[in-house]
Image (tube, rainbow, N blue to C red):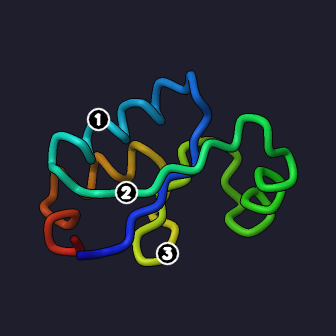
Amino acid sequence: MAKVELYTWANCPFCIQAKDLLDQKKIPYTEFNIDNNEKKRDELYKKTKQKTVPFVFINDELIGGYTELKNMDATGKLDFII
């Protein structure tokens, strides 16, 4: 099984949707809430050039946010990678 990591904010609707999608598919993931961790947010922004949450990583590779995760699921790529 692939390693899935989510970097989220507590009340972010897209973060909640990403977690719901993974939960529905019974895909285990590790969540890192970065609400109060400005250093980690800045580090992720610099590393990924992505300014929005969630940050979704599969096997240490950024796949994007919720939209990309949803698209991977719709095309079957998510099941293939996991």
The residue that mark 2 highlights is: 29
Give the SS element for disc 2. loop
Q: What whole-number distance in Å separates the C-alpha atoms at marks 3 and 1?
A: 21 Å
Vertical relation: 21 (above or below) 44: above
Front disc: 3 or 1? 1
- The amino acid type, in three-letter code, at marker 1 is Asp
- Find out whether the residues at labels 3 and 2 contact each other: C-beta distance under 8 Å: no
Toward which corner of the image does residue 12 lie, by quadrant?
top right
State the mark number for residue 20: 1
Could you tell me the amino acid type at mark 2? Answer: Tyr
Q: Residue at 80% across / 45% down in the picture?
A: 37
Residue at horizontal 30 percent and vertical 75 percent from the top: 2
Question: At numbered mark 1, what does the secondary structure look like: helix, strand or loop?
Answer: helix
Q: Which of marks 3 and 1 is nearer the N terminus?
A: 1
* Residue 29 place in picture, x, y as percent: 37, 57
Image side of residue 8 versus residue 29, left or right: right
State the image coordinates of residue 13 (x, y, percent, origin top left): 47, 24
Q: Is residue 33 above or below residue 73?
A: above
Q: Earlier in the sequence, mark 1 or mark 2?
A: 1
Distance between the alpha carbons at the discs numbered 3 and 2: 14 Å
Residue 54 — which label? none
